[in-house]
Amino acid sequence: MGKKLCHILIVALLLFAGCAGIRIDRSLRPSAYDWMMYGGAPTRVNVTLSRIEPPLESKWEYNALGGIIGQPLVRDSVMIVATMHGELQAVELGTGKRIGYVVLESAVAATPAWDGKYVYVPSALGTETLACIGVERAERKWTAQLGSIESSPLLLGDTLFVASMDGVLHCVDSRDGKVLWKFETAVKSKRKPIRSSPASNGDVIVFGSDDGGVYCVDRAVGRLRWKHQTSGSIFATPIVQDNRVLVGSLDGNLYSLDIHTGSPAWKYQTGSRVYGSAAADRELVVIGSADGRLHALKNTSGERVWTFSAGSVINSAPLIAGDVLYFGSLDRKLYAIQTSSGKELWQHSAEGRIKVSPVLWGKTLLVTSEDKFITAYRSLQNQ
C-alpha cells in the first residue's frame, strides 16, 4: 500500500471515529421543564409545567436512522434519544442537528433515565443489558447483566430500579452498577415477562406484569408489600397520584388502588384493551384504549367526565400541559384536546403512526412518529 493511500485511510478512520461520540462542552443547567425519565418523574404522571398553545407548526424533523420506542429526554436544550439500531444520540433542540452518538451493545426498546451527567440505558438483547453512559465525554462508566429489558429504568437518588423480561425487579446502585437486591414475581418456571416500567412515590416501587399482577415492593429491601391481581396482562406503566396507583390492563379496565394496601378504590371499564399509561393531575386521570377512545375520569371516584374518539388505536400515554392535552394515535395524527372538556382544539398529520408519548420542554413539543422520526413543534401564537 502506498504512503499516500495509507495516509488517506488513516485520516478517514480518524474522521469516522470522531463522529462516534457525544461531547457536550458545557454544564447542562437543570430546570423545572426537564424530562429526565419516562413519564417525566418517578410517579410517571405524564404532566408538564411547560405550556404551549395550539395551533402548532413543525420547526424541524430529526431522522434517527433507527426505530424509536422510548421518549426523548431533554435538559438545557439538549435532547437524548435511544434507538432500536443500538445508538444513544444527542441532538441540539434549537436546530434539530445531531451533536453526536454512542454505539450500544444492542437495541433499546424503552426510555433511558438521565441524571444530567449519566444516561442509564436498558437493552433488549445482548449480555450487558444495562449501561451507564457519560454524555459529556461519552465514556461507558459501567455495565450490568440483568437479562433482556423492555421497560424503562426508574432513578431515585443513587438507586436504579429496573424490571427485566424474566420477571425480576432489580435494585441497582447507579454509581457502580452493583445489584443491591432482587425481587422475583414467582419461581423461575412460573415467572412472566415485565414490560411495565416501575413507578414510585419515594417509599415503595410499583409495577405490572404479564401475569396480570400489580406488585408493590418496599424500596429499601425489596420485600413485597401487596399484590393486586387483574384478569389481563399489564403492559402499561402504573402512575402514582395522591396515594393512588392508577394502571390499565389488557382486560380493558383502569384500576385505582390504594398505594399502602393495594385495596381497589374504583375500577373503570374502557370497553377495549389498555396498552398505554395514563396521565393524571389533581382532578383528572386520562387514558387511551385500543378502540381509539380517550377517557377522562375524576381522580377521586373514577366517574367519567368525557371521552374523545381518535381514528385508531391509542397505545401511548397522553401528556397534560395545563388545560391542553396532547396525544397521538396509530391514525398518524397528533391531537390537542382541552383537558377540562375533551373538546378538540387542533390536529396535525404526522410522518407515521404515533406510538410514543409526546414530550414538552419549554415551548417545544417533541413528537415521535414511526418509525424513526422526531418532529419539533412550536406554537403559531408565539410568532
Image: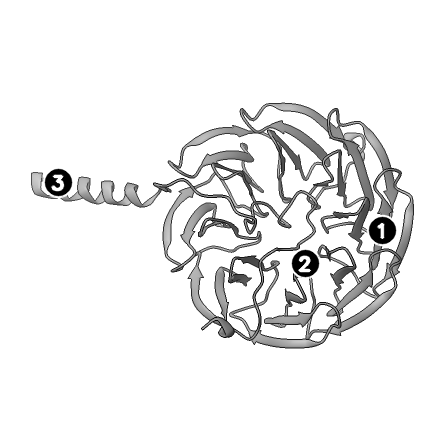
Mark on residue 256? 1
Q: Earlier in the sequence, mark 2 or mark 1?
A: 1
- Give amino acid for label 1: Ser
User: Is 104 situated left or right of 20 in this image?
Assistant: right
Q: Quadrant of residue 216?
A: top right
Q: Earlier in the sequence, mark 3 or mark 2?
A: 3
Q: Are marks 3 and 2 in contact (CB under 8 Å)?
A: no
Q: Name the residue located 13 percent from the left edge and 40 percent from the top edge.
A: 7
Q: How is the image coloured?
A: one colour
Looking at the picture, does residue 319 appear above or below residue 201?
below
Q: Are marks 2 and 1 in contact (CB under 8 Å)?
A: no
- Residue 365 screen position, x and y as percent: 53, 62
Give the Cα separation between the discs numbered 3 and 1: 66 Å
Q: Which residue is mark 3?
A: 7
Q: Earlier in the sequence, mark 3 or mark 1?
A: 3
Q: Name the residue located 75 percent from the left edge and 24 percent from the top edge.
A: 221
- Mark 3 Cα shell of 10 Å, populated few (<14), some (14-19), many (≥20): few
